Image (spheres, rainbow, N blue to C red):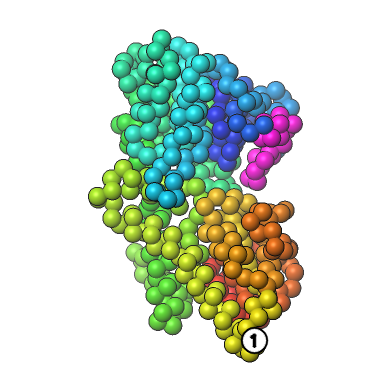
Amino acid sequence: MTFLKISVVGLGYIGLPTAAMFASRGIEVVGIDVDPKVVKTINSGGIHIIEPYLDAVVYKAVNEGKLRATLIPEASQAFLIAVPTPIDHATLEPNLDYIEAAANSIAPVIAHGNLVVLESTVPVGTTEKLCKWLSLKRPDLTFPDTDAEASDIRIAHCPERVLPGKVMQELIENDRVIGGMSKTCAELAKELYTVFVQGECVITSSPRTAELAKLTENSFRDVNIAFANELSQICDELNVNVWELISLANRHPRVKILQPGAGVGGHCIAVDPWFIVASSPKTSNLIRTARNVNDGKPKWVLQKFREAIHACLAAKGSSETSEITVAIYGLSFKPDIDDLRESPALAIAKTIHNEHNGPIVIYEPNLSSLPSALNNAKLVSSNTENQANVSLMLVDHSAFKNLPKPAGLLIDTRGVWR
């Protein structure tokens, strides 16, 4: 099948780069988003997120008439759904409202022969739910849940597998996992992605396998990071340098311990393991424990901060915390990006902002302004001389790597001043 026009629902960190990539291959791409500001920005040739090389590709595609954004879905040959799948932080249950809303929005315009691909990372069984939601809205069409090979609409799951900061490169180079509701669905989805994907497009036995594959990848990372984070707390308790310890242990030919940090953030590793726990609560003990360890690390960092404040006050012989200046390095969930989603550094900064009544200086080279929740803090460039009494290294941006060691008390979660 020759794809002449496709629609991408959701123009965020995955949807917009994916739309731009298809448009760069000469396909007419319609991007659909619920935010009028996003639509206006893209139609002017701009972007609303920071991702290397994305701006040039979007600008070129828009000006060549291959990419445009809209609030209202329209007829296309293929529809890619790339909307958020958050969790309810109170219940830790996945929220599929955005996917259901996306399904309802495209249902009126889908037609015989169309392909619908779910790219969002989802709990096991969600692709089947998507099929059901569409079929309820369009009883005049057949779907692969009832007529697998001869259905009017083809449905598949192809989760994104990219690293923020390298999205444009990895969209092309990384292998893709494709799970179709039928073999015909999977083959058609594979045909679509091979338009720009140079990695292998691997067809799985079912959408459930594809869904669980993505969750497994991120849960594997989460478990290994949890080991490093727990080890850092053990080392602190035993007065051992964790960075030296990990370096020594990693000299073993079959050991590769990751580096600890302030926690785990982002919309993938910090969220996806909970999807497995929600689907299989009785048997996902290790995955749940890893999540609890990583979610608990910011609390540990905050306790170290409070201890540092008390030490400063004792040294000054004062009880006035307003005299204590705090410096925070990094707010994003990983180095060298502007993405604040599920960021443990941001959560730590917000708590410090609420608790501390003295000056707070934040070094974050990837942001031009601070979130409103940090309105009393000051955003400065990374080359400003640090005169803080307490400094917290939370995200090791490249701009921080060669900074001199501050004179005050240090809480270095990334080993920059090791």
**Element assignment for label 1:** loop
Residue 346: image quadrant is bottom right
Q: Quick one: label 1, few (<14), some, or many (20+) residues within 10 Å?
A: few
Picture coordinates of residue 34, whole percent (x, y): 60, 31
Queried whether the magenta region covers residue 143, the answer comes back as no
* Residue 131 seen anywhere in this rendered image of the structure: yes
Q: Residue at x 35, y 32 (%)?
A: 207
Picture coordinates of residue 31, whole percent (x, y): 61, 28
User: What span is in magenta?
Assistant: 37-55
Residue reaching furthest top?
Answer: 140
Q: Residue at x 74, y 31 (%)?
A: 44
* Residue 361 against residue 49 in the figure, above or below: below
* Residue 409 against residue 266 in the figure, above or below: below
Q: Which amino acid does label 1 sit on?
A: Ser
Please state which of residues 38 and 113 is positioned toward the viewer in this rendering: 38
Please state which of residues 65 and 377 is positioned toward the viewer in this rendering: 377
* Residue 203 seen anywhere in this rendered image of the structure: no
Picture coordinates of residue 287, whole percent (x, y): 33, 54
Q: Which residue is drawn at 54% across and 55% down?
A: 343
* Residue 70 against residue 370 in the figure, above or below: above
What residue is shown with label 1? 318
Residue reaching furthest left?
Answer: 282
Q: Which residue is drawn at 35% across and 25% down?
A: 181
Please state which of residues 313 and 63 is positioned toward the viewer in this rendering: 313
Residue reaching furthest front?
Answer: 319
Please state which of residues 331 and 228 is positioned toward the viewer in this rendering: 331
